[in-house]
Image (cartoon, grey):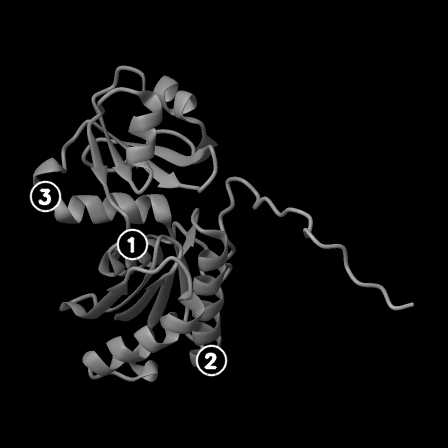
Amino acid sequence: MKLLALDSAINGCGVCVYDEHHGVLAEKYIDISKGQAEHLMPLVEDVLNDSALSYHDIDLIGVTIGPGAFTGMRIGIATAKSIAMVLEKPLIGVCCFKAMLGSYLDLKSDSKYHPFYAVILETKRKDFYFQMFKGSHNKNYGEAISATTQNIIDLVGDKDCIFIGDGVKRLEQEYGRKISLCDMSSLSPHIIAMEALYNFRSKEITINQITPVYLKMPEIGSPKNCPRKLL
């Protein structure tokens, strides 16, 4: 089975073509804070060309569904849905918490048996997106929530825990103490592909019913200028 994995929910755009028997065929990531809509499809074209495959060679499409940046998350999901609909291929969602933890473990192979992991994702607000995982099997230890620094410290307590994600430095600054952390600003596209394949095989995730994961609804303010009226 060959997979196309997409992400634009966390600090950039990433795309991977993955073969379940041969691993990564092609992978690209660019670190951008905006403009995902302009960059995502060209990245898809690039990785397909690099892997010497066409769209019709793809069997499954995976996409990150959040939590993450509101606009980037929706761009990724909309793009993945469009590709899946045109190709008539199954589409499956990947949780950004699981993808971030998997990306960390992929880089830090000596840390796979840490007692606890806390994934901290930036919201660009006063809170964070937060979820804990336990042990070498990476099982959910708690619910995915929107939490303040104090909420997170209270929930972690005295557990032997490493903090992972793009929000860990701000968490440490606000906490005022040194914590065991790994500052990671992006997800590995091949990890998204592997998570999508696992979800597909295990049937843990509903196929094709993909919706963004919002732990807190976006804050939308009123326009600064009053709308013009025709007299």
Which residue position holds label 2?
86
Q: Quadrant of residue 37?
A: bottom left
Which residue position holds label 1?
195
From what the image shows, is residue 122 above or below residue 6?
above
User: Spatial distance from mark 3 to mark 1, Cα to Cα?
Assistant: 17 Å
Which residue position holds label 3?
109
Q: Earlier in the sequence, mark 2 or mark 3?
A: 2
Question: What's under tag 1, amino acid-wise?
Answer: Glu
Task: Give the SS element for disc 3.
Answer: helix
Quadrant including the N terminus: bottom left
- Name the one closer to the observer, 16 or 224: 224
In the rendered image, residue 62, in percent from the top left (x then y), is placed at: 36, 63
In the rendered image, residue 28, in percent from the top left (x then y), is placed at: 23, 68
User: Spatial distance from mark 2 to mark 3, Cα to Cα?
Assistant: 38 Å
Q: Residues within 10 Å of mark 1 (few under 14, many from 20)?
A: many
Q: Residues within 10 Å of mark 2 (few under 14, many from 20)?
A: few
Outermost residue toward the left in this view: 110
